[in-house]
Amino acid sequence: MAAPVRCFPHPLTSSSHREASWRSSLSPAEFSGWRCLKSLLARTRKDELKRLNSQLRQINEALRRQAKIEAYAPGLSYAPVGRIKETEIIVDPEKQQLLTILRTGKHFLRNQDPKKAFILFKEAFDLAQSLEDHAEEKKAARGLGASLQRQGKYMEAIKYYSKVIEISKLTGENSDITEAYGAIADCYTELGDLERAAKFYDKYIARLETN
């Protein structure tokens, strides 16, 4: 039996309620397809993109409201902090403090308070740098990018998403690079810089195809 084909809602006719209901049912692969669609739009004629750009922003906002935390991954299940295993014992009080701050920042981001989340993620980011803990520094940078993106501070968000890429390359742990490219592309789309958005969507898609 052939697999069912999901139709994306038309950006000019779908209501916010239908968009939100549709978004909540997307799988990670289907969200990647939606992001790829945005990439294709970004590469069509510039005057058409300008006309559609406001509708895309409205759809993006509806998608974010249905996200578990922030618009930074297919399926938007991204969380800056992983759950600590019961068997993991942390003896360093500063590391324990760092993880607690990250968890609290994640809580505020989940509950739609990106300003408080930003303060906590920034504190975690600075502490992780002082401890030279690149893994937690990268989680804090992701949280900072997400909280700034939620506040509409797209250029600042790009700065921290770029930091995620930098740390990933430094440590050789590249699993977060793909989604960082996608998040940066989303930010440039919101800024109306469609040429740069298209370049980062291309990088995002290229990594999806090779990973």
Image (cartoon, helix red, strand yellow):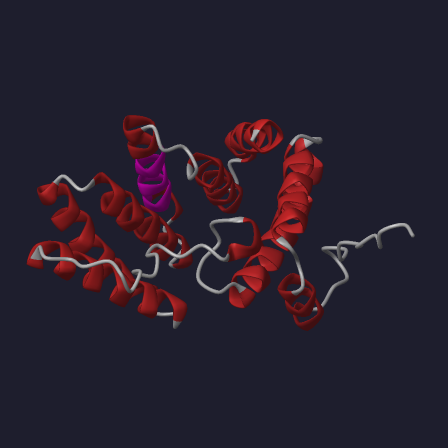
Residue 157's place in the image compared with 22, above or below, is above
Of the pair 208 and 12, the residue shown nearer to us: 208
Give left or right: position of 74 versus 109. Answer: right
Of the pair 192 and 64, the residue shown nearer to us: 64
Instruction: Give the overall secondary structure of the magenta segment.
Output: helix
Q: Residue at x 26, y 67 (%)?
A: 104
Give left or right: position of 202 versus 37. Answer: left
Q: Which residues are magenta?
A: 156-165
Residue 185's place in the image compared with 102, above or below, is above
Task: Where is residue 191? Give x, y as percent.
Answer: 48, 43
Q: Residue at x 31, y 60 (%)?
A: 85
Q: Residue at x 30, y 51 (%)?
A: 144
Of the pair 52 and 175, the residue shown nearer to us: 175
Task: Where is residue 179? Give x, y as percent.
Answer: 48, 41
Of the pair 75 and 36, the residue shown nearer to us: 75
Q: Is residue 163 a member of the stretch shown in magenta? A: yes
Residue 207's place in the image compared with 99, above or below, is above
| Figure quadrant of the C terminus | top right
Q: Is residue 162 a member of the stretch shown in magenta? A: yes
Residue 65's place in the image compared with 34, above or below, is below
Task: Where is residue 93? Give x, y as percent.
Answer: 7, 59
Give left or right: position of 123 versus 93. Answer: right
